[in-house]
Amino acid sequence: MESEDEINEWVRLKHTGQNEGAGTVSWDGQQTSRFRAIAEGKPDMRLTFLDDLRRMEAVPQYIKDRLGDIKKTNFDRLIGDPDIRNLLGLEIVDNKLQLINGINPFLLMVLNDLVYEDLNVGTIYLKKDRIKYIESLKERLKQEDSAIADRQNSENSDTMGDTNNTGYHTPKLSNGDYSANGVTNGEQQSSSTTNAASNGLTP
């Protein structure tokens, strides 16, 4: 039988952290849930969904790389709310989380918040907090869409070039000249010479 000193040392290592490799490494929420699922033979549908996300091309790699860092309590609280699931395009079928119409922008925003913004449990703890969070997501997406539209309009404006007074696009020539309706200065001069010659005039 182990001596009391040996038992006390084992207890110290177990309850005082990793101790440079000698102690017990604490499990996070995901690891605990995975062990429980294996031990009890009951898969956790939320963890299964995170595993599914890792195999989806529509999910950016930088998010996939950090899915293991998501605090499971926060993820469970969000996914447990039917209004959040509806926003993210999720439904529960046969005890599994399934996407209704693929990855939508709100799901990517929430995943980004969970893995990079360290979403505070206080911001999603109560139902009223989650409603406020939903509204903030909608506003953020609206602002992002507006910024993208402004950027595209700016890029289109830059590539259109000048226009003549009729509103038609006036292409820019390789020598830096502009001409209306795509007729080069050389072509205009040649045309003028031909017209003058036909009238017996010397240009």
Image (cartoon, grey):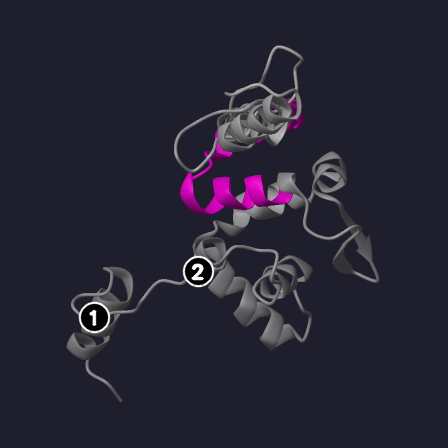
| Residue toward you, 131 or 198 | 198
| Residue toward you, 41 or 112 | 112
Identify the mark nearer the N-term, 2 or 1.
Answer: 1
Relative to residue 10, is residue 136 depicted above or below?
A: above
- SS class of the residue under badge 2? loop
Relative to residue 2, is residue 181 depicted above or below?
A: above
How far from the left and from the top, in percent, is residue 118? 42, 40
- Residue type at mark 2: give it: Asp
Q: Which residue is mark 2?
A: 65
For label 2, the crowd category at 10 Å Cα-Cα, with few meaning under 14, some 14 to 19 and many 20 or more, is few
> Which residue, as the protein is rendered here, is positioned at the far top?
165
- Residue type at mark 1: give it: Asn
The magenta-colored residue range is 107-136
Tag nearer the camera, 2 or 1: 2
Give me the residue at 57% from left, 69% from top: 36
Q: How many marks?
A: 2
Give me the residue at 68% from left, 44% from top: 104
Q: Main secondary structure of the magenta part?
A: helix
> Which residue, as the protein is rendered here, is positioned at the far bottom?
1
> Residue 8: which numbered mark, if any?
1
For label 1, the crowd category at 10 Å Cα-Cα, with few meaning under 14, some 14 to 19 and many 20 or more, is few
How far from the left and from the top, in percent, is residue 111? 54, 46
Could one spot residue 144 in this view of the protein? no
> Which residue, as the protein is rendered here, is positioned at the far front?
200
190 lies left or right of 166: left
| Residue toward you, 25 or 157 | 157
- SS class of the residue under badge 1? helix
Q: In the image, is residue 121 part of the stretch drawn in magenta?
A: yes
